Image (spheres, rainbow, N blue to C red):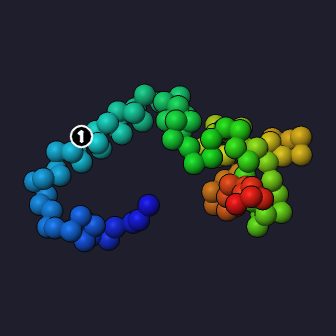
Amino acid sequence: LRSAISLAESVGRIVLASEIRETIALSILESIDSLARGPAEVSRYYRDHALFPEGSEVEWNEGHARGTVLGLGSQGELRVASNGQAVSLFAEDVRVRPVRSTSD
């Protein structure tokens, strides 16, 4: 996945606002509607699109801690089972990454 600084640069031509305005507006409205349905909808969306889905192995604290993803907590934190305990990981506190297998 490459981040684009410019739509024109990314697609190789000038992109007019009129070409994308309706699509962007509809996408924003869908996102707002999803959020208005409440935390359960946000949680479901996370489960469907998670970088770290339930059951995946992750590590944090520069590789010194490992665990298995349980899902999201009530405050949006990543809940992880580690050493027989459930641990809450907040984005501002840790850098989490998937565990790489030894064959990678």
Q: Residue at x 32, y 36 (%)?
A: 30
Q: Which residue is mark 1?
A: 26
Q: Residue at x 10, y 54 (%)?
A: 18
Q: Is residue 77 left or right of residue 82?
A: left
Q: Say which quadrant the C terminus sits in.
A: bottom right
Q: Say which quadrant the N terminus sits in.
A: bottom left
Residue 74 in the image, given as x and y percentages of width and height: 64, 37
For this orientation, the residue located farthest to the right is: 83
Position above or below: 31 against 99: above
Q: Is residue 30 left or right of residue 56?
A: left
Number of numbered markers:
1
Q: Residue at x 56, y 36 (%)?
A: 47
Residue 60 falls in image quadrant = bottom right
Secondary element type, mark 1: helix
CA neighbours of label 1 inside 10 A, class few (<14), some (14 to 19), many (20+): few
For this orientation, the residue located farthest to the front is: 103
Residue toward you, 42 or 98: 98
Q: Residue at x 21, y 45 (%)?
A: 23
On the question of residue 65 being in view, the answer is yes
Give, as a three-letter code, the residue at label 1: Leu
Residue 28 in the image, given as x and y percentages of width and height: 30, 44
On the question of residue 88 being in view, the answer is no
Residue 50 in the image, given as x and y percentages of width and height: 56, 43
Position above or below: 98 against 6: above
Q: Is residue 90 left or right of residue 4?
A: right
